[in-house]
Amino acid sequence: MTGLLLRWLLWAWLAFSIAGAFLWAPLAKDFLGQSSRILFFHVPMAWGAFVAFVVAGAWSLLYLRRRSPDHDRAALAAVEVGLVYCVLATVTGAMWARIEWHTWWNWDPRQTSITVVLVFYAAYLVLRGALEDAEARARLGAVYAVIGLVVAPFFIFVAPRLASFTLHPEPVLNTDAELKMDARIGWVLASSSLAFNVLFFWLHRVRWRVLRLEARRGGTLVSGEVS
Amino acid sequence: MSGGIGWVLAVNLVIWTGLFLYLLWVETRVRQMERPENES
């Protein structure tokens, strides 16, 4: 019962954040039209993806230490949900670029780096799919996800800052270490970022449990049955 | 608030509420299948 209440509280928190993004937060200066409102979805998705990949790396480290298949399933679930977040961050970024830059895609350093991260974690799934032996799949997948603990932070935080020129707006974590936005924008951004990250942990837990059930039953669950 | 933004807000809320309800439903099904009597 408490769990259900907490889930509805999360829904209220998400709804509150979304409403705040459209009704309470002012438009950011120097942004065209209403484009700055995409920020309240784009940034939480990007952060959620990063958190997901760190979670995947942490579970993979645990797997390499204890060799529990359940830890491997937790890492896989984190990568899968993280990829969904990463795709949503990329799509919302492209929508914003269409308004601001008049093009969906122009290989800005930020767009290039998120593409590298997307391909890197998509390759994690391909690697797992290519291996028949469950133990080898889990072990190699874990090593790959641990390497991701270096790859993801580098391409999300370091590589875009090494570029000599970018059209991407100054990120929240900028080189001057100060919040360069209206306080209300900051509040809504913090609220939606936290809410979508909590949603990630819920999604991750559900997907992990589904993977555990599939392993127990020896097949993929389709519409509640084993195929 | 302009009408356009109101519509975008409404569509957003409908989509996220739908996803939320679907996730609740999936979790309920998973919980049912995790019960020992439902294990194959």
Image (spheres, rainbow, N blue to C red):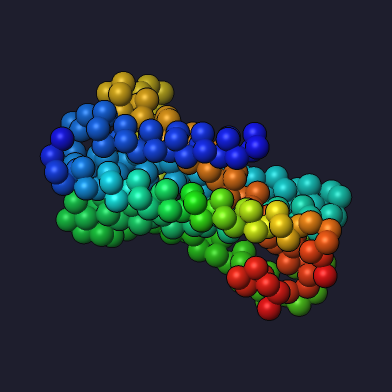
Q: Dividing the picture into quarters, in which one does residue A18 lie? A: top left
Looking at the figure, which quarter contains the C terminus of chain A? bottom right
The residue sitting at 25% across, 32% down in the picture is A23
Which sits in the foreground, A53 or A156? Answer: A53
Answer left or right for A127 relative to A113.
Answer: right
The residue sitting at 38% across, 34% down in the picture is A17
The residue sitting at 32% across, 36% down in the picture is A19
Answer left or right for B7 relative to A5.
Answer: left
- The image position of residue A189, as x and y in percent, is 38, 32
- The image position of residue B12, as x and y in percent, is 33, 48
- Count of marks, rendered view: 0
Q: Is A220 situated above or below A51?
A: below
Which sits in the foreground, A206 or A54? Answer: A206
Q: Is residue A178 visible?
A: yes
Which sits in the foreground, A63 or A119? Answer: A63
Q: Is residue A152 visible?
A: no
Q: Is A26 situated above or below A81?
A: above
Q: Dividing the picture into quarters, in which one does residue A143 lie? A: bottom right
Q: Is A59 situated above or below B34?
A: above
- The image position of residue B10, as x and y in percent, is 28, 46
The residue sitting at 20% across, 33% down in the picture is A27
- The image position of residue A105, as x and y in percent, is 28, 60
Looking at the figure, which quarter contains the N terminus of chain A? top right
Answer left or right for B29 relative to A107.
Answer: right
